[in-house]
């Protein structure tokens, strides 16, 4: 087991939150036109609002600390979009879309948890960044629970 802590910065936290929130928002935007279930559509719209809030918050924090906002690699975004198109071409049911969203939320929980666990810096100095990552974990956990009803 790897117990070596990384020298992460506030910028690393905010950049990771920004990129993951943008990816989540993009996924929702791409999937919404395929959703017929009104309840799932409402849940996805709430998630989209949350992702947009987290992306905006991370962007503001990056600008505050003088860091450039880096968008996700175009190839990665196109690849993700093509993967979603393929998966929904095979099965566009509410259950399958909910499952895809749950998988994405669980990946984000894992990424944020890994970020928190590997942070070796001064936790007081990065308090805002750590709080934002924890908030994202809580948000994604609530998303998973809300989406389970559509499985």
Image (cartoon, grey):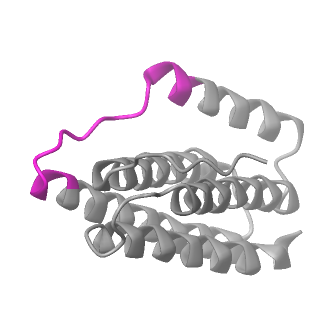
The image quadrant that residue 99 belongs to is: bottom right
Vertical arrangement, residue 96 with respect to residue 50, above or below: above
For residue 106, side relative to residue 16 (left or right): right
The one of 104 and 1 positioned closer to us in this rendering: 1
Q: Tell me the quadrant of the picture where the C terminus can be found.
A: bottom right
The one of 133 and 22 positioned closer to us in this rendering: 133
The one of 70 and 45 positioned closer to us in this rendering: 70
Vertical arrangement, residue 54 with respect to residue 103, above or below: below
**Which residue is located at x 60 percent, y 47 percent?**
4
For residue 11, side relative to residue 138 (left or right): left
Q: How many marks?
A: 0
Q: Residue 15: image x %, image y %?
A: 35, 47
Outermost residue, top side: 75
Residue 39 is covered by the magenta coloring? no
For residue 120, side relative to residue 11 (left or right): right
**Which residue is located at x 82 percent, y 48 percent?**
92
**Which residue is located at x 59 percent, y 67 percent?**
44
The image quadrant that residue 67 belongs to is: top left
Q: Residue 145: image x %, image y %?
A: 75, 80
Residue 63 is covered by the magenta coloring? yes
**Residue numbers of the magenta segment:** 62-78
Vertical arrangement, residue 133 with respect to residue 124, above or below: above
For residue 83, side relative to residue 42 (left or right): right
The image quadrant that residue 91 belongs to is: top right
**Which residue is located at x 24 percent, y 54 percent?**
59
Outermost residue, front side: 4
Q: Residue 41: image x %, image y %?
A: 63, 68
Q: Residue 33: image x %, image y %?
A: 61, 50
The one of 32 and 26 positioned closer to us in this rendering: 26
Vertical arrangement, residue 7 with respect to residue 124, above or below: above
């Amino acid at each position: 087991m790897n117990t070596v802590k990384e020298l992460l910065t506030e910028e690393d936290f905010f950049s990771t939150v920004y990129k993951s929130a943008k990816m989540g928002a993009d996924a929702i935007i791409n999937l919404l036109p395929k959703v017929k279930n009104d309840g799932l559509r409402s849940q996805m719209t709430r998630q989209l609002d949350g992702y947009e809030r987290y992306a905006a918050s991370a962007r503001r924090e990056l600008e505050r600390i003088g860091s450039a906002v880096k968008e996700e690699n175009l190839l990665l975004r196109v690849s993700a979009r093509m993967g979603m198109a393929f998966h929904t071409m095979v099965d566009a049911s509410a259950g399958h879309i909910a499952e895809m969203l749950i998988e994405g939320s669980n990946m984000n929980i894992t990424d944020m948890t890994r970020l928190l666990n590997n942070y070796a810096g001064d936790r007081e100095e990065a308090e805002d960044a750590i709080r934002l990552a924890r908030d994202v974990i809580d948000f994604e956990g609530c998303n998973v629970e809300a989406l389970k009803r559509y499985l």
